[in-house]
Amino acid sequence: EDDPCEADVELVGEGDMAEVEVEFGLSDISESDYHAIKQALAQYLGGRPWHGAELANFLVAEKNIGTALRAADQCFGFVSMVRLHSPRTKKLVSLKEVQDHVLQLVNASKHKRAHLQAIFEASGKGAKGVGLMLNERLVNIPESLAWPIQDNLFEEIHYAVEHNTDGDGAYFDVDYYLYITTAVSRIGGAPPGEAPVPGGKKAVKSESRTELTEIKPQSALEYGKVEDEIFQNCAELVHVAPAQKGQQRWSLVGAVKEYQVVMLIAKDQVPRALERLKALTGEVKDEAAE
């Protein structure tokens, strides 16, 4: 059943600001979401051609996890997880393309590439489990919906593992989550106190960095999804690389440069990330549950 979440959305029309109430629903991904998911995945690898439609087909066929964000019977976003190097997914060309793309993105850092390769190799041998976490939605979706979406995904994963749903408990029990997202930085930097890039959030304040989480550029990144900043600060590995296409574009506040961000998040860091996200945006699901 749908889990209703209400949020106020501002619509702009002919110079006037109108506030309307839109009811978003969280529900299982279904075949009717295929085209929306396929479209959302089209730019997932930075604009390079890939078999995103194949992965979309796999996601809509997955019955145990996966959440669609809907309003007025339309899909505006989704979250799911696909395990790499599993008998269930070994024939998916799209996952091999994702893995190759990630290694290419981190190629500038020998240490990060070596770490990822070691994790992937361990995953291929069954010593470690790596799940590709997919988290895509329109940039103007209210950020207050971020926590219920993420919480729903990890509740489903926990349930599938604990109850060995359809005998797939081991499939969903991963050690790491591989996450790919996008960010921008302003050309020349953002003046203090100036509004963030439309569609982006406040500049990320990174916590203490290690060799695996040191990021370049050092100038502030602005994410389109509020949870991405939290994931970055909970990740074991973070790497920022220029997007393959459209590396620079213009916005209302000037020129911005686009990046793809790769993160590797250990399973034991997920509760901390969800707690932080709930502290920022968790009131929506709490109210819906009352």
Image (cartoon, rainbow, N blue to C red):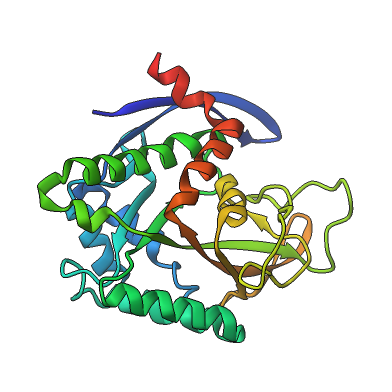
Pinpoint residue 258: horizontal percent, then vertical percent.
Answer: 64, 68
Q: Position of residue 134 (x, y in %)?
A: 39, 57
Location of residue 213 by image quarter: bottom right
Q: Is residue 92 above or below residue 158?
A: below
Q: Is residue 141 left or right of residue 62?
A: right
Q: Which residue of the protein is positioned furthest toward the right in this rendering?
A: 192
Quadrant position of residue 129: bottom left
Q: Residue at x 62, y 35 (%)?
A: 13
State whether residue 50 appears in this view: no
Q: Compare residues 34 and 28 and report the one nearer the observer.
A: 28
Q: State the image coordinates of residue 60 (x, y, percent, origin top left).
A: 22, 53
Q: Position of residue 288 (x, y in %)?
A: 41, 20
Q: Is residue 2 visible?
A: yes
At a point 22% along the width and 58% down the height, the residue shown is 171
Closer to us: 26 or 169: 169
User: From what the image shows, is residue 186 above or below residue 153?
Assistant: below
* The N terminus sits in image quarter: top left
Specify the farthest residue to the top.
290
What residue occupies the far left of the structure in this picture? 166
**Image quadrant where one finds the C terminus:** top left
